[in-house]
Image: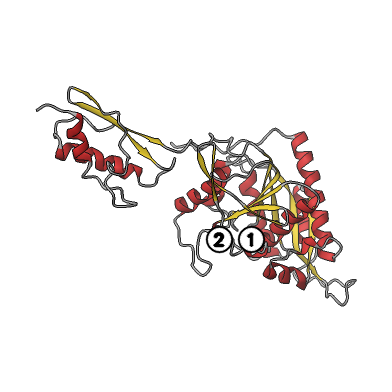
Amino acid sequence: MAIYPQLIIDALKNVRYPGTGQDIVSAGMVEDDIRIEGMKVSFTLITEKAHDPFIKSVVKMAEQAVLNYADKEIEIKGNISVKSKQAPRPALPELLPGVKNIIAVASGKGGVGKSTVCTNLAVALAQKGYKVGLLDADIFGPSVPKMLGVEDAAPLLEKKEGRDMIIPIENYGVKMLSIGFFVKKEDAVVWRGAMAGNALKQLIADADWGDLDYFLIDFPPGTSDIHLTLVQTLPITGAVIVSTPQEVALADARKGINMFTGDKVNVPILGLVENMAWFTPAELPENRYYIFGKEGCRKLAIENGYALLGEIPIVQSIREGGDDGQPVALNEHSITGMAFSALADNLVLAVDKRNRELPKTGIVEVTRK
């Protein structure tokens, strides 16, 4: 039986794209490059996106359709190539060429105020004139949009250099993206690790972050495969570990430190932040009550040879500012505003020292045995 291009096209009309239900020929997914050499047939499929989640199954269905509807003797397996209408992402680790410093803000456990610290630190840096980006990578509890007062914002897509790019939402001088923008507020995010990792990669690689002095990443609490995805995707300049002074939190902070400093990850620790260091009532600003213990984080920093970048007191305005979308760091003359301003200054010094004394961090290489 003679093999000719129309035979192949007619066979491919039986393949429906899972995303739309339209056949791949009508959808314009079959390139006009069908090559026939004896029984060997090859051609190209065109996708809209560079990372089409359905393309692998479409290729398999196309192979099967050619065998079922054209000729079962055709050599088609492995001969279908794929190209995208969209320009490809830059190669790792050059995803963010305009970003000078990538800072992980992490904690060993939840409930220590890591997102509050990260958000106010970003605002404090922006107040000092730095270009700041903030990625809310806490996939399962994205709280940064609320804290920055942009909970109802919807990021736009813009075509740039052949790619559809997400435009970060900007407020208080901070460019920010969060998975919270792409899920309903009341819905729980129930995703497997790979899905969550892919979503984060999109927020990093398919967004127009532009030129930034500091790109802060609010990591999820604990140590998980999300952490590994991030260190495998970006060359992280250094990590800031947030803890409260109590022993149970410090034990988990040690685990967070060990994750970043382990041989495989090897991200420098820029320093520690002691959150909820003491309680100060607004009417008695000179008084300090050490509810969660005293200077536990300072001791941990000294014990490990790390800098204590900041001590943030418990003040009611921090909680109110987070709930109202008005970060306390905006008021540089308040007790907490001054604490976050000092934290920002200390971070700038720590990053400068790290960049002078240590080589640039690489991305973590994935090795499979």
- Which numbered disc covers residue 309? none
Question: Image quadrant of residue 32?
Answer: top left
Task: Name the residue: 55% across, 60% down.
Answer: 180
**Closest to the observer, 50 or 192:** 50
Q: Could you tell me which residue is drawn at 15 percent across and 40 percent down?
A: 68
Q: How far apart are marks 2 and 1 (CA)?
A: 8 Å
Looking at the rendered structure, the kind of residue marked 2 is Gly
The reply, left or right, for residue 32 in relation to residue 179 is left
Quadrant of image for the N terminus: top left
Quadrant in which the C terminus is drawn: top left
In the picture shown, does residue 69 fall above or below 248? above
Do residues under tags 2 and 1 come within 8 Å of each other at their CB atoms? yes
The quarter holding residue 26 reads top left
Q: Is mark 2 on a helix, strand or loop?
A: helix
Numbered mark located on residue 144 in the image: 1
- Residue at point 48%, 62% (across, down): 189
- Characterize the local packing of mark 1: few (<14), some (14-19) or many (20 or more) Cα atoms within 10 angstroms: many
Question: How does the figure colour the protein chain or chains?
Answer: secondary structure
Work out whether mark 2 precedes mark 1 in sequence or the reverse, and give the earlier one: 1
In the image, is residue 339 above or below residue 232? below
SS of the residue at dot 1? helix
Residue farthest along the left direction in this orientation: 1
Q: x, y (%) of residue 191?
A: 45, 58
Residue 148 rendering spot, x and y as whole percentages: 67, 61
Q: From this viewpoint, is residue 218 visible?
A: no
Residue occupying image coordinates x 23% and y 28%:
41
Q: Which residue lies furthest to the right in this view?
A: 286
Give the camera-side residue of 44 and 135.
44
Q: Tag count in the figure? A: 2
Residue carrying label 2: 180
| Residue type (three-letter) at the residue carrying disc 1 | Val
Nearer the observer, 129 or 76: 129
